Amino acid sequence: MRMPSGRRGRARLERRATHAISKPYRKQFLPEGERARAIMVKEAYKFGIPPLAAGAVCLALGWKWPAGILIFLGLFVFYFFRDPERAIPSVAGAVVSPADGHIVEIVDEPLDSKMGHRVSIFLSIWDVHVQRAPVAGRIAEVVYRPGRFYAALRSAASRENEQNVIYLETSQGSLVFKQIAGAIARRVLCWKRAGDVVARGDRVGMIRFGSRVDIWLPQAAHVTVRRGQKVKGGESILATWTSTA
């Protein structure tokens, strides 16, 4: 087969190659059951390809150190945007972690005048940054709140940082979880909107580059994790919630 010649021909070939490579990853935005083989978030290409391309140019010019740094950066971006499948628990009343990371706070505090439990999870840059629904239910509201960019480990980040607040209605009552920006993470993305129905463990959004996720549970829920514990989004059980009392 004759290869295309000229700039236009090469451009067409590059577009076809990019389309062929990226097609599987568009599954990220399809319904849950249709993307079982998705391994990374589509945005990985936007952030990962430029440093890889620049690294390849540097390598061709013999600039080994800059090439190594840029190629490492590009590969790390693809690693950061990974989206592995998870074994979703089928235990009745289980509330799964909405994010990967470490438990940094477990406190009793009110939300909208109702007392409950807040569990805060810190996500380092090494953790998976895709968030998942902690229980099955209907998204009642997604509220974006602009704010500061304190370090995500600080308790004040829960109240004052930029965040998406996601209200989830279930057959047992309401719970709330937050995608919270940090000092490095400057973008919180929610892929769901009011009225969407989610199953336990469904993907709901992403925070870029280090962040925090809080979940507020009713007082009737029994928290089963401890501070410092490592958790996996959609897989680790944070609490059991079997009563509406």
Image: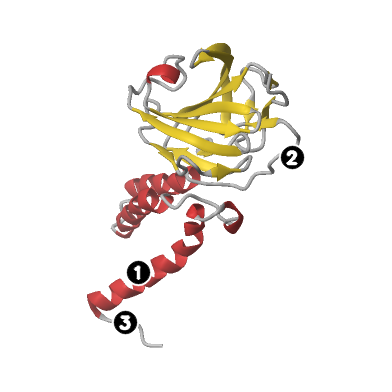
- Amino acid type, callout 2: Ser
Question: Can you tell which of label 2 and label 3 is closer to the viewer?
Answer: 2
Residue located beneath label 3 in the image: 4
- Say which of 237 and 165 sits in front: 165
Of the two numbered discs 2 and 1 on the same chain, state the one appearing first in sequence.
1
Of the two numbered discs 2 and 3 on the same chain, state the one appearing first in sequence.
3
- Taking the spot 54% from the left edge, 11% from the top edge, the residue there is 109
Residue located beneath label 2 in the image: 90
Q: Residue furthest left?
A: 7
Q: CA distance from mark 2 to mark 3?
A: 53 Å
- Amino acid type, callout 1: Arg
Of the two numbered discs 1 and 3 on the same chain, state the one appearing first in sequence.
3
- Say which of 26 and 230 sits in front: 26
Q: CA distance from mark 1 to mark 3?
A: 13 Å
Residue located beneath label 1 in the image: 15
Where residue 89 appears, x then y in whole percent?
Answer: 72, 39
Q: Residue furthest right?
A: 91
